[in-house]
Image (tube, coloured by chain):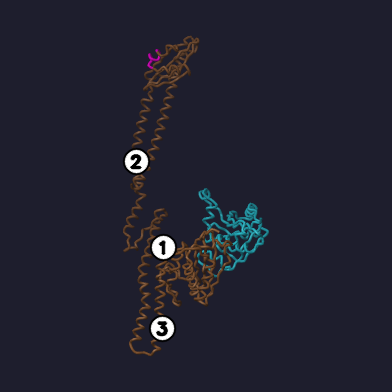
Chain colours: A cyan, B brown
Amino acid sequence: MKKILIPTDFTVESLNVLKYVLEHHSEKKIHIVLVHGTMLPDSISELLFFRKNVFMESLMSDAFCEAKDIIANKFFSKIHRIETELYFGFNRSALQKFIEAHHITEAYIPTNYTFKKVNKKSFDFIPQIKKVLPKVTAVAMESDTTTYVQDSVASLFKY
Amino acid sequence: MKTKTKIVLFFASIFTLYILIFSGFIYYSISIYSYNDFYKRLELRAITTAKIELDQTHPEITTIKQFRQGYLEKLPNEKSYILKWDVSKSKVDAKLMGIPVSFLENIAKNGTDNYRNDGIFYAGVVHEKNNQKYISIVSAQNYYNTHHNAFLKNLLVTSILITIFLIIATGLWFSKMVLEPLHKITLRVKNISSENMHLRLPITEKNDELSALAKTFNDMLNRLETAFETQKNFISNASHELNTPLTFIIGEADVVLSRIRTPEEYVESINGILEEAEKLDRKTKALLFLAQTGYDGKVQKFEKVRIDQLLLDVKDTVMRIIPKSKMIIDFSLLPESPDKLKVKGNEQLLHLAFSNIIMNACKYSSNQDVRVSLGATQKEVIVIVSDKGIGIPESEMKYIYDPFFRASNTNNFDGYGIGLPLTRNVVKMHHGVLIVSSVEGKGTHVEIKLPIGNYPI
């Protein structure tokens, strides 16, 4: 089965790409990996007690989890699995290895979108995706006219 | 018993136990070691004694004698015995020497054995000569046992006693230091009552648990103070709101009755009075309803309510009351399974709550588009009402749930200030959450989350 990569910055806005993929993709069952790029912590004590799942949960806001659930419930029969992963490398070959390890076949990236740092070690690896994966589809995001202070589920419904 | 005493007792007993085990272990090991050491020395002497006495013709005898004289000093109260091993006479021999028979028998059986009697240590070996077994026993007093070990024992006991005393003292001081801030907080909070609710706890720069406690306490006091103020204001607000139409009615009636007027004037006057009376009626009804929904004790009829159907019904109501309104329902992210849209609740109350919010959205955006979206997570149904209206000023956000409160930018719009508190009460009754976020001048959105009813398929 095809495995699709969607980069995310753990905001509800970025899930609009997920919505687009589930609405427009031709396959009957889709397996999606939401990937967030962040650097590993530097200090020994932090690394000693580092647990990927706990770290990911601390980055995902309530609104993000709710929005993911809403989308999952809407496209229930079309989704094989939605995973969330962290990506730690930051050069092209690291991304290549990551993609091979997870057997990712294609990617969908947002255009006209400003990346928001949810963690001070997060980084944007969208430019590298284009160079590494052969099949990359761009999804145009509408520019936000009503920006509210907090990241909320309402961002899902604008499009 | 007090926490302080508990802490001290707990730590003191644990530490004492540990120290006791520790010292006991040390004392025991040293004793065993010194015993074994002493037995070895006795054994050595027993062997050399046997060789000297019994092998007198042996060529090495002189060497052994020199060795014994040169290197083996005489132990205190040292005695040596050599006897021919004869099983029948073993009991008599044992009694003569003042040692148990088992000792002799063990030596004969194992080749060597030890025995201790009250400070006198015995070690025995077997020596064979001309096919005859001889037993050589050396006994002496163990200086180390009587003096050094005894000293060690006394030292350990005294040290333990001193340590226990020190531990209790340290423990008392330590627990006092830790619990002092708690004590301070207790004293300060005692002073806070309904008269001086503005008192707060001092917050230190430290980032520890007690500081977090003080901060949380202060937050709670803030909320309590706001609640108290709201209560105080509510009564005055309510009476003021109800008074205004009454004043108009009384004033109008007085003026009209002051002289004879034309029938048209009377009709006009009475119409005005009727209008104000109806307003008063609506206000009191709303107030009553607010009071009723505010009480959790009231049992309302709860049944299955489908939110998507409810929203369509609300759209009809809104269209009826505000014909120019533009309410757009967004069902684009509706869950595939309709069970995720069923909520346990009272349809009339939920209808009222949603129509309040939506009509507010329409009203304060001067009938621009109001988007109502519906979605469901695993546990909740989420309804989002967003408008592009005047918004709510940041500084007034904390007052929006106060009955009769109207924000400063609402002067061009009609309203009583009852809708939002009413809606919040209804949502609370349904164990839901109401979240309002707004940017002044840009718009508002209201999120209502209700728990899914988990009705079986």
Pick the quarter of the image with the N terminus of chain A. Answer: bottom right
Q: Secondary structure at mark 2?
A: helix
State the residue in front, B371 or B19.
Answer: B371
Which segment did they paint magenta? B92-98
Name the one closer to the observer, A156 or B300.
Answer: B300
Magenta segment's dominant SS is helix
Q: Which residue is mark 3?
A: B271
Disc on res. B296: 1
Vertical side of B164 occupied by A139: above or below: below
Residue A80, image x, y percentages? 62, 56
Q: Secondary structure at mark 1?
A: loop
Q: What amino acid is labelled 1 in the image?
A: Asp
Q: Is residue B96 magenta?
A: yes
Give, as a three-letter code, the residue at label 2: Leu
Q: Position of residue B309 (x, y in %)?
A: 54, 67
For badge 3, the amino acid type reads Asn
Res. B327 visible in picture: yes
Which of the 4 quarters of the picture holds residue A2?
Answer: bottom right
Number of the front mark, 1 or 2: 1
**Badge nearest the viewer, 3 or 2:** 3
Q: Answer yes or no: are tags 1 and 3 on the same subunit.
A: yes
Separation of marks 1 and 3 at Cα, in angstroms:
40 Å
| CA distance separating discs 3 and 2 | 91 Å
Q: Does the segment drawn in magenta span residue B26?
A: no
- Residue B426 screen position, x and y as percent: 45, 66
